[in-house]
Image: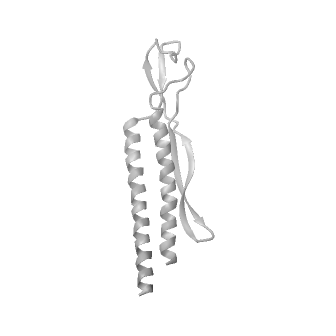
Amino acid sequence: MKEILGSMNVSASAMRAQGTRLRVISENLANASSTAEVPGGDPYRRKTISFANVLDKVSQEERVVVRKIGEDPSAFRLTHDPSNPAADAEGNVKLPNVNVLMELADMREAQRSYEANVQMIDQAKSLVLRTVELLRS
């Protein structure tokens, strides 16, 4: 029984981590076309997320946690638009280093991982209920 509850805790920690990943991806998508507020300034920089396994000393279970939310150091995209208020002296505007297709693929992957962990918790819950039913009879 302890192992089943432990697996539920591990899945719950993974769900929290994937939820954070979905929030970061959503922020990237929301800012995919934003520009700088000042001429020649830098626009939104894509955020990245990394995970780590951490041992819970009380339960002796490995949990998934967000290790770091960082920034993607890749170059900004440039477009020539002298009429844009964010354009530099040459008329170039820096656009965020967000690739919408990549973000959508990451979002789908995070969603599937989240759903897999939900199914894992459902299966563990079902096992606990069956065990309780067996003990009652």
State how many labels appear.
0
Q: Quadrant of residue 81?
A: top left
Q: Identify which residue, 133 or 73, lies in the foreground.
A: 133
At a point 41% along the width and 46% down the height, the residue shown is 107
Extreme-front residue of the structure: 136
Q: Identify which residue, 26 or 71, lies in the foreground.
A: 26
Image coordinates of residue 9 in percent, x first then y, are 52, 66
At a point 63% along the width and 71% down the height, the residue shown is 58
Extreme-bottom residue of the structure: 137
Q: Identify which residue, 102 or 28, lies in the foreground.
A: 28
At a point 38% along the width and 41% down the height, the residue shown is 104
Up the image or down, 27 lies above or below 43; here it is: below
Q: Identify which residue, 13 or 81, lies in the foreground.
A: 13
Image coordinates of residue 125 in percent, x first then y, are 44, 70
Image coordinates of residue 91 in percent, x first then y, are 48, 13
Up the image or down, 56 lies above or below 23; here it is: below
Image coordinates of residue 51 in percent, x first then y, are 52, 53
At a point 39% along the width and 60% down the height, the residue shown is 116
Q: Quadrant of residue 115?
A: bottom left
Q: Quadrant of the C terminus?
A: bottom left
Q: Quadrant of residue 121?
A: bottom left
Up the image or down, 10 lies above or below 24; here it is: below
Up the image or down, 56 lies above or below 17; here it is: below
